[in-house]
Every structure is written in C-alpha cells, then in structure tokens.
Amino acid sequence: MKKFMIAAMTIFLIFSCGVKEEGAAVEKTTETKEVSAPEKETLKKEKVPESEKVTVDGIEVTIENKRIKVGDKLEDAELIAPVNEFNKMKKVRLSDDKGIKLIYTAPSLDTPVCSLQTKMLDEKAKEHADVFFYSITDDLPFAMMRFCSDNGIANLKTLSDFQTHEFSAKNGFLMKEYQLLTRAVIIVDEDNIVRYVDYGKEVTDQLDLGKAIDFLEKKMLKK
C-alpha cells in the first residue's frame, strides 16, 4: 500500500509539471507586444500632397525634413569644395559668400541632365558676376574637379554634400531612399532668405532654369 501511494504521488507530480510547462508555452506563443505611442507614430507614413511629390523614374521618393519654401531662411551647413587637380579639398560654408545666391542641387554631375544644366548655369554665372552661382551634389570633390576641367566650368562653384548630408538634410533636399540630393533650384537674398524655389517633380527631368533666371533678373536684380 505504501509503494502504491508513492507511485501515485510521483505520477501526479509529473503530470502537474507537464501541464504547467505546456500552459507556459501556450502563454508565450500568444503573447503580444504592445506598441508604444512613439513607435506607432513611426509606423505612420506621412501623406505627401500631390503637388509636392518627387519621383525617380516614376517611383515616389521621400524627402528628408520639410521642403524649403519661399520666406524660409536657408540653413547654413558645411560643404566640401575641390581645390586643385592634386585632389586637395577644403571645408566651406555658404555663409562665407555674402550676396545673392542661386543654388542648383542634383544627384550627380555625372548624369546627362545634371551635366547639361550645370553647363547652362555656368554660362549664366558669367553674365552675372554679382551673383553667387552654385551646383551642389553628392559627388566626390575629385570627380567635380575632373568634370569642371573637362567641361570648362569656371564661373560657378561646385560643392559636395557627400560627407555629412548636413546641407541637404537641414534644407529638405535629401532623398532618403538614395541618400542623394534631389533636383531643385533656389534663389536667396543677401540675408539668405529664400525668394524662389523650384523642386523637380521627376528627378530625371530637366528643371525650367530659364524661369529661375528670369526671376533673378527681374525680381532680384531688377533688370
């Protein structure tokens, strides 16, 4: 009788432990993670107005930060400028130049559209020595130097945002998916207040630079 009682208790304990372990397993598999409010916010995709959408080959991309607009102050940032053919470069800031500025942003000088429009702006820069013209891309400064040398670019400044993306991120020109600058042109006055801005809707298309130059001449220079 004593042996029977010991055996019965052993079976009971084994069965009880098995049920407990199985129950714990069920609880574990059915456990759900509560998403915090900040996490829920990141899951929401901000809806971009149709007029502000930017695409690359027809596919919408995300522009980091808010797009800059007329009346905003252009945020200063550190950029890299090529110095000479010996692969020298230096850090500069747009605030180093005092005066009206026309700034063209694009992914790279080594694309047909960027190359063509940079050459067009270089010709206009020659006509307006009292205005600072810039082409800002994510190219390496060495590539910029080669491009300028091969294409006779001598009147506008080519600057790179490749190191930190500080300029493009602060001012709303950085394409998140590509980590490259979108195509845009802006004109700022002597106080770095934006007076004209045009974002290209399709990055692979040309911007209407004639419209920007017309604004510069008639509204800023009053010619």
Image: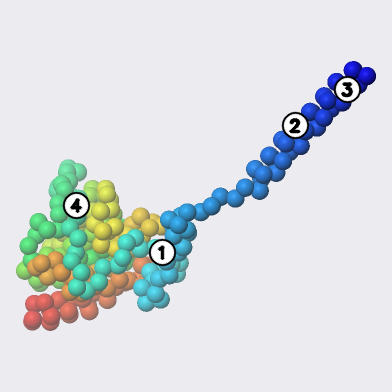
- The answer to whether residue 180 is above or below residue 8 is below
Q: Residue 137 — which label?
A: none
Instruction: Compute the Cα span from label 1 to label 3.
Output: 74 Å
Q: Which residue is mark 4?
A: 78
Describe the element under mark 4 as helix, strand or loop. strand
Displayed quadrant of residue 118: bottom left
Side of 19 relative to 29 (left or right): right
Q: Amino acid at mark 2?
A: Cys
Q: Which residue is mark 1?
A: 61
Instruction: Compute the Cα span from label 4 to label 3.
Output: 84 Å
Q: Which residue is mark 2?
A: 17
Q: Amino acid at mark 1?
A: Val
Instruction: Compute the Cα span from label 1 to label 2.
Output: 56 Å
Q: Nearer the viewer, mark 4 or mark 2?
A: 2
Describe the element under mark 3 as helix, strand or loop. helix
Q: Amino acid at mark 3?
A: Met
- Crowdedness near tag 3: few (<14), some (14–19) or many (≥20) residues, C-alpha within 10 Å: few
Describe the element under mark 2 as helix, strand or loop. helix
Instruction: Compute the Cα span from label 2 to label 3.
Output: 18 Å
Displayed quadrant of residue 16: top right
Displayed quadrant of residue 96: bottom left
Residue at 15% across, 69% down: 193
Side of 190 relative to 147 (left or right): left
Q: Earlier in the sequence, mark 1 or mark 3?
A: 3
| Image coordinates for residue 203, horizontal then vertical, percent | 36, 67
